[in-house]
Image (spheres, rainbow, N blue to C red):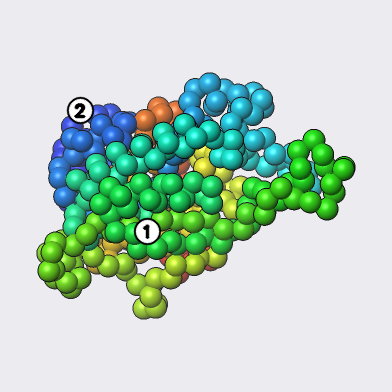
Amino acid sequence: MTIDQLQKLYAPGYESYPFTKSIVLHADCLEWMAKAPPESIHAVVTDPPYGVKEYDPEQLEKRTNGNGGIWRIPPSFDGHKRSPLPRFTALSHKERERIRAYFSEWAKLVLDVLRPGGHVFLASNVFLSQTVFAAIADAGFEFRGQVIRLVRTMRGGDRPKNAEEMFPDICSMPRGCYEPWGLFRKPLPEGMTVGECLKEFQTGGLRRKPDGNPFEDVIESERTPQRERRIANHPSLKPQSFLRQIVYAALPLGEGIVVDPFMGSGSTVAAAEAVGYACIGIERHEEYYIMSQQAVPALTQLYIKKTQLSLPLT
């Protein structure tokens, strides 16, 4: 499918921007999925904001001003300023229910646009994954396990707040050393095998690594390098060394369309471009949509030493 065809079919009425094989849209993903051609998308790879208040304008302003709000502003460490983190432990029961309801609605729309056998890779965290994954499975997806991104984060490991000196040998919770990504599959038509699904819909399985070994559910990762953050200043930016592996696995035959409904500054789109895939990125915040237009090409061209997907494929 050409870029013109992609825009004509998936971006009518929306502001969009083209790249080599992919496009980005300024749109709300729920509205977009309700209008998109049914059963036409092959995979979804995304890192959502969980539909809660961390990206509300009031909270973003607090983060910018260093006041925190739901965003925890970590102290500097060894002279390095650390990125803010959302305080998911501070969410109330009502806010957690809001998350469950949102992802239930979201998953039903994804089911409509995804081809049978299509996979969803969805980033989460240890505080919310149980709620989010259950909502998506209840909507009709098969839960296919988790992909564990091994990365030492700055979340957790703190001494009790306002009692650090009194309890110096205590941490209120473990230091985070992994990030869970939920893996889901739209059910295959009744009686259809994976092989038959691959023939008819180009979906149903996961692509093996370039060396022929199976895709694995534990991936050693890194915190997003500063060179990537300088290109795309988004608080939830994931490293290309990880995203390229996830995106590559998402299309079993190396053909089709990947969608990122919460694209932020476009890192998933860049990963798709880097491995030669077509991707549609959707972002409702205009600031990040505009940022993606420069960030995607720059991230795509990065040489990533730590994977077999080091160079953009032509």
The residue furthest bottom is 212
> Where residue 284 sits in the image (x, y, percent)?
37, 30
Q: Is residue 15 left or right of residue 129?
A: left
Which residue is the site of mark 1? 183
Q: Earlier in the sequence, mark 2 or mark 1?
A: 2
Q: Is residue 23 left or right of residue 270?
A: left
- 146 in relation to 299, above or below: below
Name the amino acid, label 2: Gly
Q: Is residue 58 visible?
A: yes
Badge 1 element: strand
Q: Residue at x 18, y 62 (%)?
A: 188
Q: Residue at x 47, y 32 (%)?
A: 95
Q: Is residue 55 visible?
A: no
> Where residue 217 sits in the image (x, y, percent)?
44, 67
Of tags 2 and 1, the one toward the viewer is 1
Please give the label number shown on residue 285: none
Q: Is residue 290 left or right of residue 112?
A: right
Q: Are marks 2 and 1 in contact (CB under 8 Å)?
A: no
Q: Is residue 166 left or right of residue 180?
A: right
Which residue is the site of mark 2? 13
Q: Residue at x 18, y 32 (%)?
A: 12
Q: Residue at x 33, y 49 (%)?
A: 136
